[in-house]
Image (tube, grey):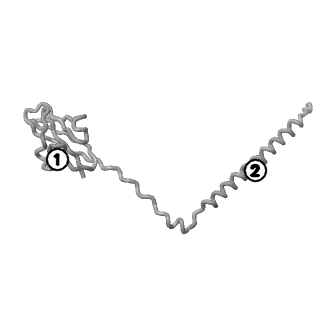
């Protein structure tokens, strides 16, 4: 078996580079951890200050959604719509579903609050006669539905 000749100069150069990389690594690590330690001491909170801190306020609760029914009896009506403050007073009217004997209804998901509304029966504004809660709004009486 022949003896292989090794290039020791390449091994020496590689060793020097490896040693330099190790020295550089430890130098950077020492600088980094020394820097972190300095920040910890600089911003350390005393136990007296920690006791004074108030807890964060609780996050606001999500609004509760409740379903409310709007209905009207309008015998002979072809179309009944709900116009309200929550749909732009007719910008996007809500069409009620017709049932027997002129009964129209729709059920909507609403969050807690007060809602002003009217019905449009074949294009004519009508108040909800089953709801006695009325308010003056822009020169006309409208119904108010309160969701709690």
State which mark lies toward you, 1 or 2.
1
Are discs 1 and 2 less than 8 Å apart at CB?
A: no
Image coords of residue 145 (percent x, y): 20, 48
Q: Position of residue 29 (x, y in %)?
A: 71, 50
The residue tagged with tag 2: helix, strand or loop? helix
Tell me the residue at 46%/61% (across/down): 55
Snapshot quadrant of residue 93 = top left
The mark found on residue 101 in the picture is none
Left or right: 106 as drawn, with respect to 43: left
Structural crowding at the residue carrying mark 1, measured as other residues with C-alpha within 10 Å and reported as few (<14), some (14–19) or many (≥20): few
Dot 1 falls on a residue whose secondary structure is strand
Seen at 20% across and 45% down, the residue is: 116
Counting the numbered discs, the total is: 2
Q: Position of residue 47 (x, y in %)?
A: 56, 67
Residue with the most extreme front position: 139
Residue 39: where, in percent of width, then height?
64, 57
Viewer-nearest residue: 1 or 8 = 8
Instruction: Find residue 82 and report its image quarter.
Output: top left
Q: Is residue 140 left or right of residue 12?
A: left
Q: Nearer the viewer, residue 66 or 81?
A: 81
Which residue is more in the foreground, 122 or 88?
Answer: 88
Quadrant of image for the N terminus: top right
Q: Nearer the viewer, residue 9 or 85?
A: 85
Q: Residue at x 19, y 34 (%)?
A: 95
Look at mark 2 in the image and give the residue it sits on: 27
Disc 2 crowd, CA 10 A, few/some/many (<14, 14-19, 20+): few
User: Who comes first in sequence, dot 1 or dot 2?
Assistant: 2
Q: CA distance from mark 1 to mark 2?
A: 78 Å
Q: Quadrant of residue 123?
A: top left
Residue farthest to the bottom, as pictured = 48
Q: Which residue is mark 1?
A: 136
Q: Residue at x 15, y 35 (%)?
A: 80
């Amino acid at each position: 078996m022949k003896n292989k000749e090794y290039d020791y100069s390449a091994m020496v150069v590689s060793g020097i580079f490896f040693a330099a990389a190790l020295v550089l690594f430890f130098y950077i690590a020492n600088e980094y951890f020394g820097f972190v330690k300095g920040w910890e001491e600089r911003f350390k909170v005393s136990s007296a200050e920690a006791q004074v801190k108030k807890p964060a306020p609780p996050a606001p609760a999500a609004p509760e959604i409740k379903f409310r029914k709007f209905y009207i009896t309008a015998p002979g009506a072809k179309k009944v719509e709900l116009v309200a403050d929550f749909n732009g007073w007719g910008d996007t009217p809500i069409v009620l579903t017709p049932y027997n004997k002129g009964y129209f209804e729709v059920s909507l998901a609403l969050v807690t609050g007060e809602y002003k509304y009217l019905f449009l029966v074949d294009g004519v504004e009508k108040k909800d006669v089953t709801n006695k809660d009325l308010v003056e709004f822009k020169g006309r009486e409208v119904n108010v539905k309160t969701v709690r």
